[in-house]
Amino acid sequence: MRKNIIFGLIAGLVGFGGLASCTDKDVTTTSRFEVRLTDAPADYAKVLVDIQGVEYNVNGTDGGWKSLPLKRTGVYNLLNFRNGVDTILAGEEIAAGKISQIRLKLGHNNSIVLKNGETISLKVPSGAESGLKLNLHAELEAGLAYVLTVDFDAAKSIVEHGNGKYSLKPVLRAYRTAASGAIAGKVTPDTLSTTVYLLKLNSVTQKNDTVATTIAKAGSFLIGGVAEGGYTVRVAPTYKFQPKDLNANVTIGNIFDLGVVAFQ
């Protein structure tokens, strides 16, 4: 059986209820990160794992650990999340840059329920309680949303010792995927006060809906957390010049660069 834990911020995607973009105070310097939980079949009635924390390390040192807030701490039945079903464990917008490791922190309330209805507690090694570490060495690019999947192989992780005793010795692996794209550009002159609108054609009304806006900072702009697809980007100075519309085709994991948008 496999349990997947996914880090990223799908909630930050256009079309998923939100979007990350720069403001008039700063340009986007963050990435979206989310945690999901899923599983595959196993020969038990329930596999109950007590999840108390998820952390990531930005520099590989003991002082580099940072917490991701869980939606709910406590016991999860892995068998509820199989055959493509998952649940979000945690999600947050974090500083873009390197992540060297992640770790999953378990509590004491771990158990399995056998098919005959018997519940058996699982002893967890002390190292598992302090954190199950996985090397990642990933680079998160500003403006993009990412999903990190951690496979928790419960079939291999549950060890039967005989005499009705079991223990939990987690077997994990991790892989990262991008979950969004982004759009960037540069307005000249860079002193020009400019608002940038991200527009998407509504298939019902056949009119453009505004899905995001941002303000160019020193001429630069970046709209992050954009779902894959075609968009119109309207670059609109607040005075003197007429807006310019440009086409952008966003793909997952990439920043579509509009280049220089010149007004003169």
Image (tube, rainbow, N blue to C red):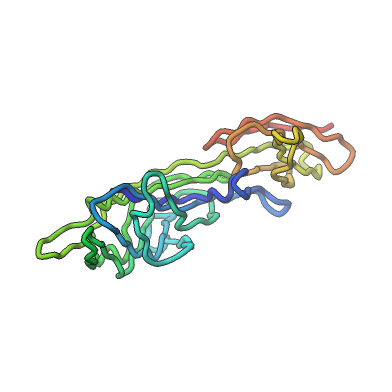
Question: Furthest-right residue in view?
Answer: 240
Above-or-below relation of 72 to 59: below
Residue in the picture at 18% in, 62% down: 166
Q: Is residue 13 left or right of residue 233?
A: left
Up the image or down, 5 lies above or below 234; here it is below
**Image quadrant in which you'd find residue 78:** bottom left
Q: Residue at x 37, y 48 (%)?
A: 136
Residue at 29% from the left image edge and 59% from the top image edge:
46
Q: From the viewer's side, name the closer residue of 62 and 231.
A: 231
Which residue corresponds to the image point at 41% horizontal and 60% vertical from the top-left? 54
Q: Nearer the viewer, residue 126 or 83?
A: 83
Q: Is residue 253 left or right of residue 216?
A: left
- The image quarter containing residue 226 is top right
Image spot of residue 258 (x, y percent):
67, 32
Name the residue furthest bottom.
Answer: 108
Residue 75, horizontal then vertical, whole percent: 37, 65
Residue 135 visible in the current orientation: no
Does residue 48 appear anywhere in the picture?
Answer: yes
Q: State the residue in front, 166 or 64.
A: 166
Q: Position of residue 47 (x, y in %)?
A: 29, 59
Q: Work out which quarter of the rendered image holds the C terminus and state it.
A: top right
Q: How many marks?
A: 0
User: Residue 148, how many percent across, how many down?
Assistant: 43, 47
The residue sitting at the front extreme is 116
> In this orientation, which residue lies closer to the viewer: 168 or 92?
168
